[in-house]
Image (cartoon, rainbow, N blue to C red):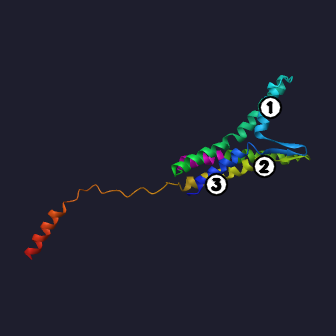
Amino acid sequence: MKAAKFLVLIAGGLAVAAWFVPMLTWHGGSTSVLEAILGAESIKRGGLPLDASQRHVLWVVQGYLLLGFGPTTLLLAIGGVAAGRGAMGRLSGLLAFVVGAWGTLVGGLVFYAFFQERPSNGAPGLAMYFLLGAGLIGVVCGLAILILPDRGPAPPPRMSTRVARPIQARSARNRSASYAQ
């Protein structure tokens, strides 16, 4: 699977792009993951009077967003290292599988929760599809690499360790053998 390392790299690019494209859309606008995290920070620092429960809710939302979207960005590092090395071994395949499974699980749970509520004024944004797609690519490529690892380019042929006899000595022996006949 020589293409798997590049597919994991593309999945990592999708995971990074998911931070910047809309995560949720509604009739009045949309918000990205980065905007949601930085917005929560600005609310905490902005001097708005927040009680302890509101600060706790903001902290929990930030934590869920970081836990949901953060690990899938590791696919970019896994794919980059594998492409740089020219090979993707079983360890990087296992990492891609685990990180991809996490992204797929989080994306699937968000879609499940979202469509259970069926809000009338909102929809999941492109970031959720990117997260789910990056996770699925990571799972498939990680599993493929675990089954059939990419060993990289073929090594050069090995040189023999036997010492060859000098050519002159061998030809002198052959000459004497041919005169005897």
Q: Main secondary structure of the magenta part?
A: helix
Q: Which residue is mark 1?
A: 40
Q: Which residue is mark 2?
A: 126
Image quadrant where one finds the N terminus: bottom right
Which amino acid, mark 1?
Ala
Circle nearer the N terminus (2, 3): 2
Above or below residue 84? Residue 52 is above
Which amino acid, mark 2?
Leu
The residue tagged with tag 1: helix, strand or loop? Answer: helix
Which amino acid, mark 3?
Val
Q: In the picture, residue 164 is in which quadrant?
A: bottom left
Label 2 to label 3, Cα distance in Å?
A: 21 Å
First to last magenta residue range: 89-100
The answer to whether 78 appears left or right of 125 in the picture is: left
Pointer 1 local density, CA inside 10 Å: few below 14, some 14–19, many at least 20: some
User: Marks 2 and 1: CB-CB under 8 Å?
Assistant: no
